[in-house]
Image (cartoon, rainbow, N blue to C red):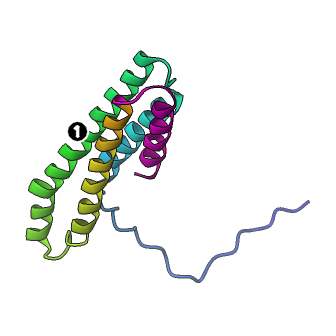
Amino acid sequence: MQAIAPRHSTAPAKTAAAPARHDIYAAIHKALRLHMAETLTRIGSADPADGASVDAALAQVRELLELCEHHLENENAVLHPALEQAQPGSASHVEADHLSHREGIADLRDLTGLVADTQGAERAAALTRLYRATATF
């Protein structure tokens, strides 16, 4: 068999691509989603009849909600003002999202309290509501 010689392209040479922009949101949001997934798993595996299991799940939910609130406060107080100063309008779309997140956090806090204040079948139902609400949060 005879080797086939490569064809020479008449297309213009490719230029180096511009360096990718750094996504300042990526790492922290990945970490938050991981914590949310772990918390959802903890809630879903909690035995409503086992007080220690439920208490551990609720403690993790509370920790997650505090972390989410701190994250929102940090973005609102530090990150978004800096982005707006550098490029007006660049963070304006986030305000509605953050309001929705705050409402979700308040709802999850209420459901966490409901689970803590119930027993038996009511606790099982409340835990299911908390699980579903966390899944959609």
Query: Which of the 4 quarters of the picture holds residue 53?
Result: top left
| Residue 3 location (% of width, % of height) | 82, 62
| Residue 56 location (% of width, % of height) | 37, 22
What residue sits 24% from the left and 54% below the top? 102
> Can you say which quadrant of the picture contains the N terminus?
bottom right
| Residue 129 location (% of width, % of height) | 46, 43
Query: Was residue 11 drawn as part of the magenta stretch in this picture?
Result: no
Query: Was residue 118 drawn as part of the magenta stretch in this picture?
Result: yes
| 23 is higher (above) or lower (below) than 63 | below
Residue denoted by label 1: 66
Question: What's drawn in magenta, residue-wise?
Answer: 116-137
What residue sits 34% from the left and 68% below the top? 18
Question: How would you classify the magenta stretch by its main secondary structure?
Answer: helix
Q: Tell me the crowding category of disc 1: few under 14, some 14 to 19, or many 20 or more residues within 10 angstroms, Cα based.
A: few
| Residue 45 location (% of width, % of height) | 53, 28
Q: Is residue 119 left or right of residue 80?
A: right
Considering depth in this image, is 68 or 136 the residue closer to the camera? 136
What residue sits 14% from the left and 73% below the top? 87
What residue sits 14% from the left and 49% below the top? 74
Q: In this view, does 91 lie to the left or right of 56?
A: left
